[in-house]
Image (spheres, coloured by chain):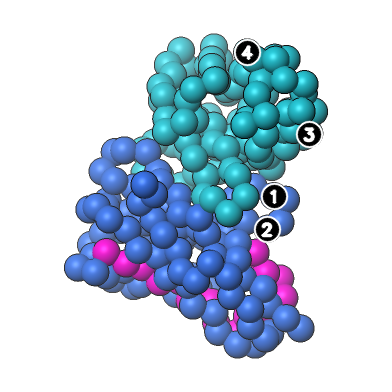
Amino acid sequence: SQQGEEDPQALSIQEGENATMNCSYKTSINNLQWYRQNSGRGLVHLILIRSNEREKHSGRLRVTLDTSKKSSSLLITASRAADTASYFCATDNYGQNFVFGPGTRLSVLP
Amino acid sequence: NAGVTQTPKFRVLKTGQSMTLLCAQDMNHEYMYWYRQDPGMGLRLIHYSVGEGTTAKGEVPDGYNVSRLKKQNFLLGLESAAPSQTSVYFCASSTGTGRTQYFGPGTRLLVL
């Protein structure tokens, strides 16, 4: 079974609104990463958060990690049409290979 | 730097045919990976390599073989293609376990 599960599966918002996606996982992790995939393209790394970190920022992105709940969230503030993409979380389980979740499809409407 | 490149971009095969997908990276990364992505699912690891001359099985290795004869190249082979192997294949590379992975643009494969 997959380690990471994103929620919701799909999200549709208006430009300028904030978008929040969640990721839950099952076993202890070393770090968790978020990736973006534009339609028909490869994945692009967004941000990495280590197991001893609780929050991390990068531009309009804010990632939180709650290891007690085995969950992470990705917040995109002031969304733009260009943010339309699928977003995946990937967990690193202490040297094992990454496990990617099924992703959240975000649509930002102009 | 070109990053990670994949050849070909798109291919149609008949059941039973064979083919090789080529991945090349110019970042001097030790680790390379092959994934497949099916609709509604995340990426699933097929095979990976932790250095030149090494390969290892991932989550879904059956029906595929790989080779890493040169550090910059990672080849994925299908000896006898099946319709279940219709998918989008992504190659990625990284400097090590748990590090950021850099992805190629993907190869769309259709097996009839």
Is tag 3's residue or tag 4's residue first in the polypeptide sequence? 3
Tell me which corner region of the image, top left, top right, bottom left or bottom right, holds residue A52: bottom left
> What chain does mark 4 sit on?
B
The colour chain A appears in is blue
Q: Name the amino acid, label 3.
A: Phe
- Residue A41: mark: 1
- The Cα–Cα distance between marks 4 and 1, rounded to whole angstroms, is 26 Å
* Residue in view at x 72 percent, y 37 percent: B108
Chain letter for mark 1: A
Name the residue at 45% across, 50% down.
A100
Same chain under badges 2 and 4? The reply is no
Give amino acid for label 1: Arg
| Start-end of magenta stretch | A70-85
In x, y percent, where is residue B51? 43, 21
The colour one sees for chain B in the rendered image is cyan
Is residue B101 shown in magenta?
Answer: no
Residue identified by numbered label 3: B10
Give residue B13's position: percent from left, percent from top.
Answer: 77, 23
C-beta proximity under 8 Å, tags 4 and 1:
no
